[in-house]
Structure formats: C-alpha cells, structure tokens
Image (cartoon, coloured by chain):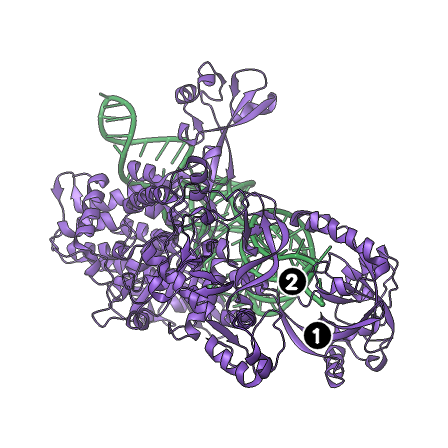
Chain colours: A purple, B green
Amino acid sequence: MDYNFIEIEKKWQSWWAEHKTYRASAEGGKPKYYVLDMFPYPSGAGLHVGHPLGYIASDIFSRYKRLKGFNVLHPMGYDAFGLPAEQYAIQTGQHPEITTRNNVARYREQLDRIGFSYDWDREFRTCDPSYYKWTQWAFLQMFGSWYDNRLQKARPVAELEAAFEKGGSAAVDAASNDAPVFTAEQWKSFSDKEKADVLMHYRIAYQGESTVNWCPALGTVLANDEVKDGYSERGGHPVFQKKMTQWQLRVSAYAGRLLKGLDTLDWTDSLKEMQRNWIGRSEGAEMVFKMTCDGVSHDVTIFTTRADTVFGVTFMVLAPESEWVEKLTSASQKEAVEAYLEQVKKKTERERIAGKAVTGVFSGSYAVNPLTGEEVPVWISEYVLAGYGTGAIMAVPAHDSRDYAFARKFNLPIIPLIEGADVSESSFDAKEGIMMNSGFLNGMTVKEAIPAAIDYVEAHGLGRRKVNYRIRDAIFTRQRYWGEPFPIYYKDGIATPLPYEALPLTLPEIDQYRPTEDGQPPLARAKDWTFNGYPLETSTMPGFAGSSAYYLRYMDPHNDEALVSEEADRYWRNVDLYIGGTEHATGHLIYSRFWNKFLYDLGYVCEDEPFRKLINQGMIQGRSNFVYRIVNTNTFVSAGLRDRYQTTEIHVDINLVRNDRLDIEGFKAWRPEFATAEFILEDGEYVCGWAVEKMSKSMFNVVNPDQVCDTYGADTLRLYEMFLGPLEQSKPWDTKGIDGVNRFLKKIWRLFWDRDKWLVTDEAPTPDELKALHKLIGKEQEDIEHFSYNTTISAFMIAVNDLQGCSKRAILEPFLILLSPFAPHITEELWHQLGHEESISYASFPEYREELTVENMVKYPVSFNGKTRFFVEVPADLTPGAVEEKVRGHELTPKYVGDMTIAKVIVVPGRIVNVVLKK
RNA sequence: GCCCUGGUGGUGAAAUGGUAGACACGAGGGACUUAAAAUCCCUUGGCCCGAAACGGCCGUGCGGGUUCGAUUCCCGCCCGGGGCACCA
C-alpha cells in the first residue's frame, strides 16, 4: 500500500464530520482551553496559502491541548458584513447576502480540505440576524449607560438621571463630551427633549458632533484606524476632515483601563506598544488663560505637558475648528480669519499632513499670561488639533519645535528658559537643564520645575493636573447598506431605543445599494423604514461592530435569550490563545477590549480582558517570477544573461515555473502574444528572475492551498507551513522545500508498510528506540508550549531517522499520537490500521517515563544535537590533561556517564569542565 | 523624529551563556535500475597544512565591554522590516 493522501484525507474528513469528533463540550470535569482564530472576511478571491498559516498553528495547539486532557473550544465563523460585497452589489445589483453566501461556501470548502478540528456546530456569520441581534443589543446597552469616573465603570442612565434630579450636573463625575452645566432645579424644569439632549452627552453610545474622516468616494465616514496616511484603507480614496453629527462609542472613557489592562496580558511587546501609542497617555496640566476680543473677555482652557515653560509663552494658538475661534476673532481680523478657515477646510487630510507648511492667521485678540500678567497675541493655526486636549495651546517657541517654526515664520518673540540652551537655530525640546527667566522656578531642574509649576497653578486656582489620552471616541455610523441597522428610531426628534422584543431589526430590502440622490444613506430607499410610524435610523454600524464580541458568542452560539448564558460564560470565561495578524492592533483588538470591559461593567461577562495570550502570525508573501523580454522584440533572455540586453521585466505565472526554470511550452501557450516567443537560454534552460512581493492576482504569484492539497495533501501543507520558519515571522511562500516534509510523511508510512506487507509487530522495543521516542516527547512538549513548531517538526524528522526499520507497536503507537496535531489525516489512518476504533484525538499524550535527572538525561538525552553536556567543578591546580584523564577514568563524573562515551572534554584554565557525551 | 523588531552558509533556518550552522531545501558524488521515477548512502561555512585527521586558523552586520567562555548579556554605531507622528 502506498501513502494515498487523497483517499485518506477524504475518508477522515467525512469520518470526523459524521462523528462530530471535535465538538466542544463543557462536560467531563476537564479544565477548559479556548483557542481562537481571527475569523476571516469571506472575500471573492478565496483563501491563499497565507490565510491558513495562523489557522494551522492554532489547530495544532488545539489538538495538542485535547491530547493533554483539556476541553478545547476551537470555533470558526465569518466576519461577513463589509465593503467589498456591497461594492460588488452596487456594480452588479446582486444582493450582498448572495455574494456573501457564495464566498462563505467557498471558504468552508477550502478550510475543510486542510483538516481543521473546528467545532462546526458553532459556526455563524456576523450578518445572520440571529447573530446581529446581539450586536444591536450591545449597542442598546451602551446607549443606556454612562461612565462614572469615580467608580471607573459604566452604569445605567437611570442612575444618572436620579443624580441630576438630586444635585444637577455637579452631582456626577462622568465621562462626557462638552456637557452643559445645570442645577437640580434646572434639570427638573427641562422638557423631555432638553433632558434627552443633555443625556446624549453622557451615553456610552451617543450621537455627537465631531470632526470626522469623511470619504466622499465611499460616501461614508471612517474611523481613525480605517484611514492610513490620509487615504481610506479600503480603496485608497482621499479623506477629508468634516464636522458631522454621528453615532459614537465613548471608547475614550476606557482609555486608562485599556492602557492598564495591557500589563496583565500575555501579548508581544510590539503589539502592546502599538496599543500604548494608540491610546497615547500624557500627563500635564490644564490652565486657564483670560483672552480678550474687542473688549469682551473669555476664560480659555489649554492643555500642556510643560507647565514649567509658562514664563516663555509668547503667543497662543487655537485650532481652526475650535469653537473659540468665532468668539475670539476681532472685527478687524474677521476677513483674514474667514479666508484662512476656508483654505484649511479645502485641504484633504493628506495635504494637511504632507504639506508641513507653516500656516496661520492672527485672530485679533490677546491673552493674559496668568503667571506674568503679560499680554500675548492669539493666533489660529492648523498645526493645533481640534480633537486633542482642548484645541487650544500656549506656545513656547524656545522649547517646542512646532511653536518655534511658527514663531520664526510670523516673527514672534522667542524667550529661552533653560540655562545654556541655544535657541538661535532651533528650539531646545529636551526636558533637561536648569530653569532661568522663570520667576520662582529659576534654578530648578526641568524635572523639578514641572510639578512645582503645576502645584503653583493648582494652589492659585489657575488650573489643575490633567491626564490626556490621544485615543478618540469611535465613530460608529457608516452611510452604507451592508451592515447592522441601528435599533434606534426618532420620536419627535428624540433618538429612542427599540424595545428588546423588536430585535433583531433586520435589514430591509432595497432596489439599489447606493446612496439616494439627495445624499441619504442607502437605507433611506427602503419602503416604510419606520417603527410605530416614526422614522428609523438610516445609517448602519461599521465593520468592527460585528467582530467586537464574536468570541463570546462562540461560547453559546444558539442562545436566543442572551448573547451568552451566564453558565457558558462562567465555564469558558475568555480566550486563552488568540492567533491573528498585527493589522488589527489598533482596530479590532482595541474595540473588542473596550466592548468586553463594558459588558464586564454591566455584569454580563466575568472576565475583564477578552484575550489572554495573543500571537501574531507573520504574513506569507508571494514569490514572484519574471521573464525578460528584449525591448522591441519577442525574444526572452534568461535571467543570468539579461545584463547584456535592454530588457523589460514581465511577471510570469508562477505555475509555469519550477525551481526558477521556465516551462517554455507552457509559457508559449499562456498568452497568444507569447506563442511565437523565442528564447536565449543558459545551459539549455530558461532561468527566471524572482522577487518577494505581496501575494496578489496581478503579480501571478498567488498560491492556492487547494493546489498544494491536490499535489501533496493537506498533511504536507500543514507541516510545510509550520516548517517554513518561526510563526511570528513574515516570509515568502517558496515551495522549494515542500518535498522534504512530503518525504518525511512517506517515511512514516514505510515504518508501517513495506509495499503490500504490514510490518507492525508486538516485539519489545530496544533501549535505543525508547530513547528516540522519549527524546521526541520531551522536545515536543517544550516546543509546542513556545509555539516553536518548526523545531518540533525537525525533532520528528530526527526521530524517524532514528527509528528507521523499527516497526514495533510499542514505539509507533505513541509516535502517532505525538504527530497527530501536525498531520491528523495520516496519523488517524495508521491509528485505525493498528486496530483502534476510537479517533486518535481521544488517546492521551504520552508522558515521560522518568524524571529528568542527569542519569536519565544520559538514558533519554533531551539536549538536541544528539549530545549531552554537563559541567563539573574541578580543582584549579589540575592541568587540562589531568582533568580529562580523571573524567575518562570516571574519577570525576563516573556515575553520570553510563553507557555513553565521552566525545570531548573541554577544560578551561579556570576550573570548569565541559563534558560532551556521545552514544 | 519617537517606539517596537530583526541582521547567522547558496536558501528556509537551529542554538537564550557552554563543540555555531541542528533539521530541511538546493548542489555535487555514489548505489539500485536497460533507463527514468522512487528510494538509499556520502560530501556540502571559508581558508590553510597534509597521505591521512577525531590537524590548524577565521567566521553569527560593525566597533568596544562583561565573562574561563558571547549568536546569546551591556554600551555605541550601520542596515532591513513594522508601527506612531504637527498629540502641545
């Protein structure tokens, strides 16, 4: 019998499906382990070999954990709402539901071929009404909650109303956006509409005006993480800043907890760092400056991290979008300011970033420095951001490079405050040195002066300590069709939640998927998009809505009563191992943590962090091949000779190339224009050039996992993807080495079968064979726990070489169990040929027979290169030769040596000897 | 500019303080075969001496340091990859 992977894989995949081998259960009193993949967006292109990399890694770990006696939850589903299906719908009129359904079916087919041990009974799509009911439910929970800064948690809005009734707005310390100030009496006198408007400033899901990323090409707003360098991440269209009223999630309220929680997580440093940068905590102070415009005074609050530099303030700057701009523009400057604002508004986000040109305009008003009493001018410039701090700053050109550039451009004074700082060419930004020109701060170091200045400001009622975060509230509306509808209707202009019984609010059918002619979102096309006669919200939720709590739903996917039952949540708790790409660092992984913390505050989940351990698998890049056409001819020159000609580089389909050698006949048949091509060869072959690029259709370098399964089988694909290198590293796909792992599987087959003869015997194993097996057990356990799968596979290869000719059941049986996480199909087949009825997954992982003592290391060496080392202290007066003699004579280490021979004794003139043992 | 990563043969890579290059690919040589495929065996970092080798020297981006001993730890550079960036 040959190793017939096609038949074996088909057989076992249907056997697993039929027996529901991998159904997760909370029974049996075993400890739980939850292994999750970042679920895919089912695109039309299907999976390429890069997608399964992380899935294979997590599958190996799941299977390993099952063998170790855990109840493993390992589910899969689809992040199915999204732009591509909708764009396709706009072009073709096909309902996104149909596109999505087809793509999901294709994904499932591809996933099944690789032999994953998912519990498919828990599969769902985020676009299923039974799923998005809970997305809508969570939104309503957020709508009905506010964030209490004192308790640092979310609470029901009813409690907020009660507090207002008692003590007005001063009664609470709540996260809010520009909430108005009022007394209890005023609150009681408010109309329903007025009360609703006030509460809207406190809700965790709220409607508010803010500067948003508006993408006209997509006709929708975008969240910060969906914009890269001023272009939309999807489609690459320009993005503009625009003030709009949008639904938002008060993520900023959780900034401190999101930051702190990182310390408790087992994530990579780089990923944590990305989140820390994104959250962007900075400590400083808010200070109040009196600003006067045409005789009218206002108290304007600014934020600074350098309170020590107040004595060097020579001007103030407002963001163009700041609400103070209107009040602080003098009659004489009105025209100039308006012209400037107009100019700023027209710029794309990209131009604002890239331009770096210093622009600004004088507002006509003046501010008083609260410490010196001096008057300084107030300017308006786009270098100050409206969304951060208070949208207004004090400018200290001597010690801030941006202020410096501005002062130079507009000829504003620069006052140095640190002894020895030369500010003639550039500012001195470093937080070091001795203060001068700074009144009571003179003589202090900068590090002393910062807190001293803040203390002074607080003591004199000029301001207060303040921690600012860079993270913004998440814009939660998209003017699109293919997303979750908001469970909100507008009753007399008041945003009102749908009652729970009305959920899910399903997407209406519409005739076209584009916005209406007057710019309304597509849902405005729906007939009768109302609730009880009142209009429903026409926006839909963004992509991250559906993916923010999906890991909870897998715990209890068919529950109609709750997102997840208390029982299921208590058992599965949170994700123990999460594997996915870094691209979600500042999107999904922030939103999910926020979402989870919110549900935790309300008592719906029992863990406050959703993902304990997280591994980022590297990207698999494509390896493109090129041919070189001599300019103006149809002659192609081999890569080694191309320097002698003027050539054009052309991507060639990698399926026409093997080991960088071109299949010339195939190439001629590929495109009609190449049918008559001629070739200049080297050594009778056409050698192609190559480059590592993103895997994409246009570069003809896409490798499809089905192709690999057809040629080599799923087990080979799995082993090879893991053998390619460390999981976290990005690497190009290169099939050069794939024969190696395929050969390895064939070798295993031959341990059991010699042509048509079954070889397995019940003979007792030799010590050597046991040693090989135990070496493998040790290595595999150690490696898998560290996700070092490539070295585990090496260990298997060594073991197979050591076991050549060994066909003893006592060795082969545990060997198969060890291998089964990596190559499940072939191991199952051989397992059953050994006479087992049950699936191999119910067998248990073999344990070490003996403790790892020095003696046993000699018997079952753990160190890997076939060598065992240890060290002994020796008297300093012995010469190296004398030491070696004593070691060999067993005088120094006789009992450790056992049946090993000493390969080498390295003696260092100190007194340590390194003894290398060899079989 | 700031932060995080990484830099080892022809290639993917091992080795986290102890013989650098495990394992695999590729390449070269050989066995079996009429032949091919498949399979198996040997060689494979560089240089040098030699009939031989379980002989010598060099070698983990560069320069220093700690140590009996450094790919590994520390300091300073150079280069690649990723993230953040008028965030006051």
Which residue in the structure is indicated by mark 2?
A387
For the N terminus of chain A, the image quarter is top left
Identity of the residue drawn at 55% across and 46% down: A519
Q: Is residue A549 above or below residue A47?
A: below
Residue A543 placement (x, y as % from top left): 46, 53
Residue B66 placement (x, y as % from top left): 61, 69
Amino acid found under the numbered disc labelled 1:
Glu
Which residue in the structure is indicated by mark 1?
A286
Identity of the residue drawn at 46% across and 51% down: A618
Q: Nearer the viewer, residue A900 or A676?
A: A676
Label 2 to label 1, Cα distance in Å?
15 Å
Residue B88 placement (x, y as % from top left): 71, 67
How many other residues sit within 10 Å of disc 1, few (<14), some (14-19) or many (≥20)? many
How many other residues sit within 10 Å of disc 2, few (<14), some (14-19) or many (≥20)? some
Q: Is residue A797 left or right of residue A881?
A: left
Q: Secondary structure at mark 2?
A: loop
Amino acid found under the numbered disc labelled 2:
Gly
Q: Is residue A885 left or right of residue A281?
A: left
